[in-house]
Amino acid sequence: MARGFRLSSELIAGVVVGAVIGWGIDRLLSTSPWGLIVFFLLGFVAGVINVMRSAGVAPDRTGR
Amino acid sequence: MIDPIHQFNIDKIFTIGHIGNQEIAFTNSSAYMFISVALISLLMIGAGRQLVPGRFQSMAEISYEFVANTIRSSAGSEGMKFFPLVFSLFMFIMVSNMIGIIPYTFTVSSHIIVTASLALLVFFTVLVYGFYKNGLKFFKLFVPSGIPIAILPLVVLIEIISFLSRPISHSVRLFANMLAGHITLKVFASFVTMLGAMGVVGWAGAILPLGLTVALTALELLVAFLQAYVFTILTCIYINDAIHPGH
């Protein structure tokens, strides 16, 4: 259960942050809906990278 | 009567004052925070300083050694600068989780606002110290070496999002584990009373959830420690990034 929470929270955090950034850019620059679309996808990528790092599949950022 | 969420209620004990129209109250959550801090202070200050340690002094020394080794192994000896922060975080989360296992108590870290503020504290410590120590070189954290220039902007964006998502996953992990564990415990415990009300057949059936409740309590004890440890080790990894950005 702990491992599941760890990985899912990593993925969700990435997607949520990406979506929030995209939404904020849309609000500021009135580029709706492109900012949300682009950053949602980027956030998904970041989330997947987070999961891979946290699961130890991809090398860590610090290279340890 | 049986409400597994009821244990997370915040009750006001007394009002401290007002900021604007917002009431600032001393709640049961604050009371349990004070209890955990008091217990930690009692353990660490009242431990004594004998050459041959007694029980309490051993506990204090073991927790010191444990956190110090965690920091040294994941952030290097430079990370020991942050020992007070990391040790306080570890002890606070662990002791408040352990108190939360006791029936009828309140678990401080089962509220996301508590874990989120702890995670944001770490996040901003990393940001401020990273810029203070490395200046603009801190941005190297977002630029992995050996990436072709064509896809570099994309990678940097992804790294920035990944960095910003840290406090979320850091806080949600602790919060979700404590919340889910305590709800599971309450649900299984309520099966015992439900089945027990059904007569003799129910009593036989109630043995299974009762055994599971006992087993889950043991598991929760492990989770309480493990999540405090995970929070600590992630803090160390993030601090390591602030000390050595980009390797």
Image (spheres, coloured by chain):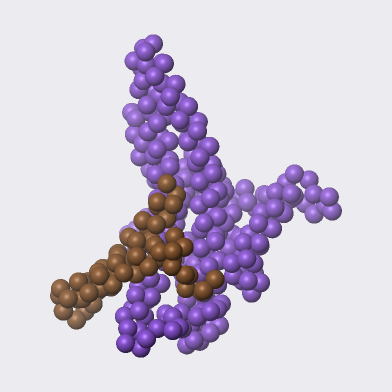
Chain colours: A brown, B purple
Q: Quadrant of residue A13?
A: bottom left
User: In the drawing, does residue B23 fall left or right of residue B80?
Assistant: left
The residue depicted at 34 percent of the width and 58 percent of the height is B22
Instruction: Kindly tell me whether residue B6 is visible in this rendering.
Output: no
Instruction: Kindly tell me whether residue A32 is visible in this rendering.
Output: yes
Residue extending furthest right?
A: B51
Q: In the rendered view, tell whether residue B196 sits above or below residue A38.
A: above
Where in the figure is residue B149, as x and y percent of width and height? 35, 88
Where in the figure is residue A63, as x and y percent of width and height? 51, 74
The residue depicted at 47 percent of the width and 45 percent of the height is B107
Q: Quadrant of residue A53?
A: bottom left
Closer to us: B139 or A3: A3
User: In the drawing, does residue B212 fall left or right of residue A19?
Assistant: right
Q: In the rendered view, tell whether residue A37 sits above or below residue B94.
A: below
Closer to us: B197 or B173: B173
Closer to us: B51 or B38: B51
The residue depicted at 63 percent of the width and 51 percent of the height is B40
Where in the figure is residue B18, as x and y percent of width and height? 39, 58
Where in the figure is residue B234, as x and y percent of width and height? 51, 63
